Image (cartoon, coloured by chain):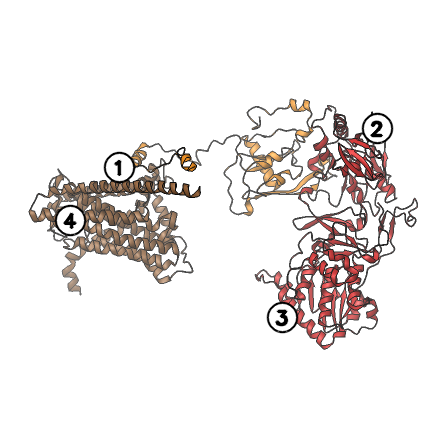
Amino acid sequence: MSNVKKEKTVKWGEEPKLSILDALYLPAIASGVATAIRHAVSGKATTRQYPEVEPEIPPNYRGVHRLNRDEEGRVKCVACYMCQTACPANCIEIIAAPAPKDDPHWKDRDKYPATFTIDELRCIYCGMCEEACPVDAIELTSIYDLTGLSRQEMIFDREKLLSVFDETVKSGKDPVRTHRGVLGPASETAATAKQAPPPPGRGRRG
Amino acid sequence: MVKVKVNDIEVDADPKDNCILAARKAGVEIPHYCWHESLSVVASCRMCLVEVGETKPDGTVAMGPKLVPGCQTPIKEGTVIRTDSAKVKTSQQMTLELLLLNHPLDCSICDQAGECYLQDYTYKFGKAQSRLDEPKIQRMDKYHIGEQIALFTDRCVMCTRCVRFTREISGTSELQVVARGSHEEIDVFPDEPCNNKLAGNVVDLCPVGALCSKDFLYKKRVWWLKHAESVCTGCSTGCSIHVDQAENKVYRLRPRENAQAQGHFMCDEGRFGFKYIHDERRLSSPRYSGAVTGSKGSYSNARGKPEDLSFADPWPEALKQARKRIADEIKSDANGFVAVFSPFMTVEEAYLLASFLKGLDRRVRLVLGPVPVVGNDDRYPKGSKGEPPAAGKEKFTIRAEKCPNRVGVEAVLRSFQGEVSRLESLLRQPDARAWYFVGGYPQGWVTDAIASAVGKPSLLIVQDIFPSPLSDRADFVFASASFAERDGTYVNHAGLAQATHAAIRPPAETRADGRLLMELAERTGLFNAMALRKEIGNAIPELSVLAAGDLGEQGVRLARYAQQPATAAT
Amino acid sequence: MWVWLKESWPILWPTLAAIGVILAVVPLLGLYMTFIERKLAAYVQDRIGPNRVGPFGLLQAVADGIKIFLKEQVIPDHVYTTLYFLAPAMSLMTAMFALVVMPFGPVPTDYEGGFRFVVQPGNDIGILFMMAISSLSAYGIIVGGWASNNKYSIYGAIRSCAQFISYEIPLGLSIIGVIAITGSLNIEKIVEAQSGSILDWNVCWQPLALLIFFTAALAETNRLPFDLPECEQELVGGFHTEYSGIKFVLFFLAEYTHIVTVSFLTALLFFGGWHFPGLPNPTGGTTLGMILGLAVLLFKVSMVVLFIILLRWALPRFRFDQLMGLAWKGLIPMGLVHLVGVAIVLSLGLPKHLLILTAALPIAAAYYSSVKFNASMGRWNALESGVRKTSAVSYE
């Protein structure tokens, strides 16, 4: 009996009663047609004419990847595999190599990516590689209209990713978005961390 | 046994233990860099500073006024160790801050990241931020330390484990500390690189990323490596090892501590001697004469053609044919059928093959194949002139016998035909009509003598990993697996039976020997080393210790060797 | 032969000309109806619709046509090839056949010689022929579904079969009223009977017949809300799942031809055909009158077509049991009662406008079904609570 008592606290829904007009269908049909006509003649199309009118991309949009260059134009990536480790889609593949020690240009570098490939088709654009990168080398740009004629074409290698950087920097639309010092937060002292806040309005972590 | 209290946990400890070992027994970790179980104590890193006190006869506890290094402090009845007081914690934090003062924090490009004690201890005991505002001292990397070793000088914490290793274990004393104070560095004398046969161990010993293996440098981040407990097959010492692999590729071998086998270390021959696993010349699929398309080796050839989309497994047919030919040969002349066992076989594989052939006819002859011996046993630590140590003073020995399981295979052969005959004795008067050769050697083992003695028999079966003059003219070639691809048991020179586990899958269409022999013998079920060990332990008295099935991480001594002392003192 | 041809030429050439007009115009119409449908759909959904090819996207239909004609002929392995090829042709053929007796412009009842807007004028079984032929279009769909050898296709075909058979009946019943009062199966005569004021249009005195006719006609043309044979959510594509390219187009052309047919029939049978109050009767024979009549008819037809397209975006699809229920429990009984009304009016010689009273039938039916529904829901609720109580006790 306790259950029956408890039942009073439960609100049981019942189907609404059917009126004559409901059963006749015709008023409902008329209102449906009226709605359709109202929209048809309103002339308020929300379509955006895409190739002519480009969409406004929010500053934190996650599009095609790029590999940033450092001040000397070398690839900024140090091949630490953090992005590959963080990637939930397993779309990043790096092969590291010791930096060419004989080249004075590379003297201050130990390790660099001999190859760096991202399968843009497999990528889910979650941005975790960007989060994981300790040297701000990999970034997602606001390029959204990525197309290609073959799967092979959509596997971006290091040079392609660097060229994306060059392009986006040249066009001026994509500023470098991450600012975390040379070796990541651990290398910053309390004082230096205070010195370099990300410029307002540019960094999405700002 | 003495009673010791660690953070209010009472444990029984060995009076020879230091505070670190006693705390470990209580489940308390005392961080340490410079101390290592098999090296002398220097107490230089100051990471293991703890509070130590003693219990007075009246029961009161008197704590020492200063923190003492746990590695250097002996224990006695009633010793009280505290690792969780504010004093100890502050000390640990400050020590780590000091050690990291000039550390470049380049974890992102450091091979040690993931198994680095600086990372682990900073995470557990350290402090997140450095207060250093000055520029860090930058030092040059030293790639000249050794053929296999690179030194990233600025990551070093000057624990001097490597220096002590070359002095105490290898006895070669290549590595030194140069300069003083904050300019201290590890280095070698000019043109005297650290290339001794145990040099690779300093990489394992280094608690940070200072000493790195050039062979493994930047090949793989360690968190992707999966470990299998295995046994090194380089010599009859049978070092316990970890096989580290990722995506079916072996990247490195590491010694696994085993006081019964070898201690903490392994030699470079074994450490870097695994490369043949991924050799392209390996046999990749079974072959037999009179295969479907007619010519010998048709399967491997046919597979190379792009238009051949047949994915049929060649093994069942090959094994069926082989079984039939073996039965025919044994029926016509059992005494003329000779099976050559390799000392690279596991006990299980030897048992499977022996029981299969002897089950067909008792007169089939089983012989032990060539046992590779190179020079003499290489014993360490060397003296100042490079001479070996006095007997009984050895800390590590590289055996001259370059195979892992002569003892085990001999035990199996003895139990099946009473005595062990060698292939060499048979070669003088070759009267065999049919041969079953088992290889598995990392290097070529078919000498001209063997090749010519075998001649043109009516049946030649070769089970091996590399092509050889024998496999080229064999009726059946069974492509088998290397040590990293097999489960089984190896018995080392001192009678220590150790289980080894497969780390990777055999490549292409090769097949692990155990499975191959199970199917050849038409035994039901899958190859399971543990179940087979139980069977062997019950069937062969000499190997009765295997009846336990699980041999543990350290392995088990055979009964007849139990009296001999272990070779590696720790 | 030549003599015969020469003698019959005055009768033959208007027929051939009309056939030519139909064959030329109908596919073009079908093509452009897809365009209109897409545009209208876009407007209803606040979009723009095709606007890339040509001005206002007008050439989109041409582009679509070219594209679909050039498409690869995909013939699945598992189809019955002969029937598979036959089905689309059967579909289109039956659809076009129905147009033989369909006046697409003013046709005088006693017009002899010269061009007329119909292939065969003065056919005394016009409506019957049309009903008979358009029923055949079910064959195209059934054969297509069967030949595809695919479970979705055959389900679509089975559905369409049931739907066609069911909706033939109300379709026929609704027309009988019109025919009986006019006293002729001749379409021109039916139109002529509505030539008076707007009150003479059939829609004005038997709206129920129009309702039944239009509903059933929608079902016959497989248009929403009755497009169960091809409903995408359940059957992928229904009977044309396995069809692509030109064969697929033939099916669709057939469907659009049906729409055209139905629109013409609606305009002719219920909305006075080419008559419009205030305009002279075009069947008088003047060229201007003919053109005006043509314009009036085409205007009416295009209104019906637009309405059919609009309905697609206004109404949800029926469930199959609802579809059958509507035919057998709603339209057929109402059609029968309406027929009785027509019989009473005719036999007692009552004014035909009394038939407007039958429009009350749906209201009565709606009242009945609402009462019945509410009662059954009440019973269900009582049953439910009973179940709840007993289960509460039994679990105690």
**Residue marked by disc 1:** A19
SS of the residue under disc 4: helix
Q: From the viewer's perspective, is the residue at label 4 or at label 3 nearer?
A: 4
Specify the quadrant that holds the N terminus of chain B.
Answer: top right
SS of the residue under disc 3: loop
Q: Colour of chain B?
A: red
Amino acid at the residue labelled 1: Ser
Label 1, residues with CA under 10 Å away: few <14, some 14-19, many ≥20: some
**Quadrant in the rendering for residue B42:** top right
In the picture, which chain is orange? Answer: A
Q: Is residue C358 visible?
A: yes
- Outermost residue on the bottom side: it is B332
Q: Give the percent coordinates (x, y) of residue B566.
A: 84, 51
Task: Please give left or right for residue A21 compared with residue C82 in the image.
Answer: left
**Residue marked by disc 2:** B58
Between marks 3 and 1, how big is the CA–CA gap?
A: 85 Å
Between marks 1 and 4, how big is the CA–CA gap?
A: 28 Å
Disc 2: host chain: B
SS of the residue under disc 1: loop
Q: Which of A124 and C371 lies nearest the eye of the viewer?
A: C371
Amino acid at the residue labelled 4: Leu
What residue lies at 10% left-to-right and 47% top-to-bottom? C344
Q: Which of B157 and C166 lies nearest the eye of the viewer?
A: C166
**Residue marked by disc 3:** B294
Q: From the viewer's perspective, is the residue at label 1 or at label 4 nearer?
A: 1
Between marks 1 and 2, how big is the CA–CA gap?
A: 97 Å
In the picture, which chain is brown? Answer: C
SS of the residue under disc 2: loop
Label 4, residues with CA under 10 Å away: few <14, some 14-19, many ≥20: many
Q: From the viewer's perspective, is the residue at label 4 or at label 2 nearer?
A: 2
Cβ–Cβ under 8 Å for marks 1 and 2: no
Marker disc for residue B417: none
